[in-house]
Image (tube, grey):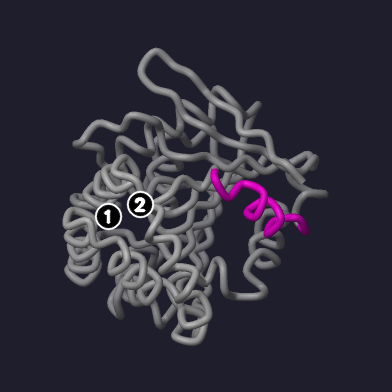
Amino acid sequence: MSIEIKKISTPDFEMEYFTTGSGKTNLVILPGISVKSVMLSADAIAAQYEDMCGDFTLYFFDRRKDMPEDYSVYDMARDTAIAIKAAVPGEICLFGASQGGMMAAVIAAENPGLVSKLALGSSPFTVNPHTRSVAVKWIEHAENGDFEKLYLDFGEKLYPREVFEMYREFLTDQSKTVTADEAKRFITLARGLEGYDMRKLAGKIKCPSLLLLADDDAVLGKEHINEAKALTEGRSNFEMFIYSGYGHAAFDTAPDYRLRLKEFFDRSI
């Protein structure tokens, strides 16, 4: 497999994306924060979603190129919505993981005619003090140029212990390849988390929505599940499933994750 990387060009920015699958339903996927662009792993990511390619045409979007230094999750979401409308014909199902889920929630709230169904994986409604402290530490490592500490702390927070240990050597090797531009990009993305708060926008999300959370999420902390429950209570369009033992990156580690997504997006509205 060799995935073609495509590009959206607007008067204000350029954004890369790739597609896979040939199904009738358009499914847009927004990944979480990363040091390196997910476009560099397009083949591996597409292979992960191979079992969904018969039912969906999948679109994976990167963040924009040449990001301004002050670039909030709201800005990311609005740029991405423009790119989606340019690249994808008609309505979409939308799945966002971690920071990608934060963006996806904003897109669904602000573009009700675009998103028919929404799934958010390991994504908070607010950036609580625990999550803020995690992001601050990552930014500190990146600013100091200590990319090994960044990658290992990143891996420890995302994965269960046994998975982290399995990837420790790979993460260490990857940390040696980080460029100055990649470090700058990561710092901008991490700083963009600050100020995110969906409490005022959650009521504007009218489409059927699935929250996939983890009770051992070391990025979001223990309070994020209670926050999600409080903010979705009484909203019939929200449903929730809580994983245990798969960590923040349950979207990569839970064996039934994509099946759960497929069943939700396949379900009649």
Amino acid at dot 1: Arg
The circle drawn on residue 202 is 2
Above or below, 179 relative to 85: below
**Percent of width and height locating residue 94:** 56, 46
Residue 128 falls left or right of residue 179: left
Q: Quadrant of residue 258?
A: bottom right
Other residues around mark 2 within 10 Å, as few (<14) / some (14–19) / many (≥20): some
Residue in the picture at 61% in, 39% down: 92
**Percent of width and height locating residue 91:** 62, 34
Front residue of 41/49: it is 41
Above or below, 223 relative to 125: below
- In magenta stretch: residue 112: no
Q: Secondary structure at mark 1?
A: loop
The circle drawn on residue 199 is 1
Q: CA distance from mark 2 to mark 1?
A: 5 Å
Above or below, 164 relative to 117: below
Residue in the picture at 19% in, 66% down: 137
Contact (Cβ within 8 Å) of mark 2 with mark 1: yes
Residue in the picture at 76% in, 43% down: 21
**Percent of width and height locating residue 79:** 39, 30
**Residue extent of the magenta highlight:** 40-51
Above or below, 13 relative to 231: above
- In magenta stretch: residue 43: yes
Counting the numbered discs, the total is 2
Q: Secondary structure at mark 2?
A: helix
Residue 59 falls left or right of residue 82: right
The circle drawn on residue 179 is none
Residue in the picture at 44% in, 24% down: 14
**Percent of width and height locating residue 226:** 32, 76
